[in-house]
Amino acid sequence: MTTVYDVPPHDLIAATAEELKAAGKVQPPAWAEFAKTGVNKEMPPTNPDWWFVRCASVLRRIYIDGPVGVSRLRTFYGGKHRKGVATGFFAKGSGSVVRESLQQLEKAGYVKKIKKGRQMTPAGQAFLDDMAHKVHSKMHGAVAAPAAKPVAESAN
């Protein structure tokens, strides 16, 4: 059985983002077009489908890290905040982006809220494992069983 751990993260996130977009269970909010992903960023993302990519990445993070809250996810999506010639320091990512994506994933049924944060539901785990299987089979080629050759009747 193929799991999230068996495929490269970039390929899994890209495939999951495409599936989330096609299914229509996740929609970018109205402000997503103008929002930055953290105070350490100067400009909004250039990828028009960045919302789906972030939701797929958050889903993968919850799968791997177990119950996780908004603060911990903000830390994961943070980066170096640079202020000109001053020494750079770490800044957390946008809490609104993480919170809204978690709420949408909850509504889709992939994540559930517990006391310690958000946790994968069995449907979410099955969804990601299915996506991992698709990515794995695409990477290694679909190994299909060879077709049975018809037995030619002899003319004897």
Image (spheres, rainbow, N blue to C red):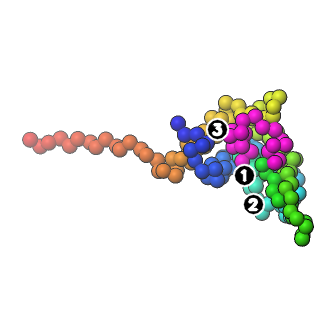
> Looking at the image, is 63 positioned above or below residue 39?
above
Q: Position of residue 79 (x, y in %)?
A: 81, 56
Q: Viewer-proximal residue, 133 or 155?
A: 133
Position in image of residue 126 (x %, y %): 63, 35
Secondary structure of the residue carrying tag 3 is helix
> Magenta residues?
57-75
Q: In which quarter of the view is residue 84 placed?
A: bottom right
Residue ID for mark 1:
53
Estimate the spatial distance between the alpha carbons at disc 1 and disc 3, rounded to whole Å: 15 Å
Residue 121, x across and y down, in percent: 70, 31
Q: Residue at x 82, y 47 (%)?
A: 74
Considering every residue shown, the one lying at the far bottom of the view is: 85
The earlier-in-sequence mark between 2 and 1 is: 2
- Could you classify mark 3 by the number of other residues whose Cα lies within 10 Å: few (under 14), some (14-19), or many (20 or more)? some
Residue at x 71%, y 46% (from the top left corner):
56
Was residue 59 drawn as part of the magenta stretch in this picture? yes
Snapshot quadrant of residue 35: bottom right
Element at badge 2? loop
Q: Find disc 3 in the rendering and name its residue.
A: 127
**Dot 2 alpha-carbon crowd within 10 angstroms: few under 14, some 14 to 19, many 20 or more:** few
Main SS of the magenta segment?
A: helix
Element carrying mark 1: helix
Q: Is residue 144 left or right of residue 18?
A: left
Q: Amino acid at mark 3?
A: Phe
Other residues around mark 1 within 10 Å, as few (<14) / some (14–19) / many (≥20): many
Q: Is residue 106 visible?
A: no
**Residue with the mark numbered 2:** 47
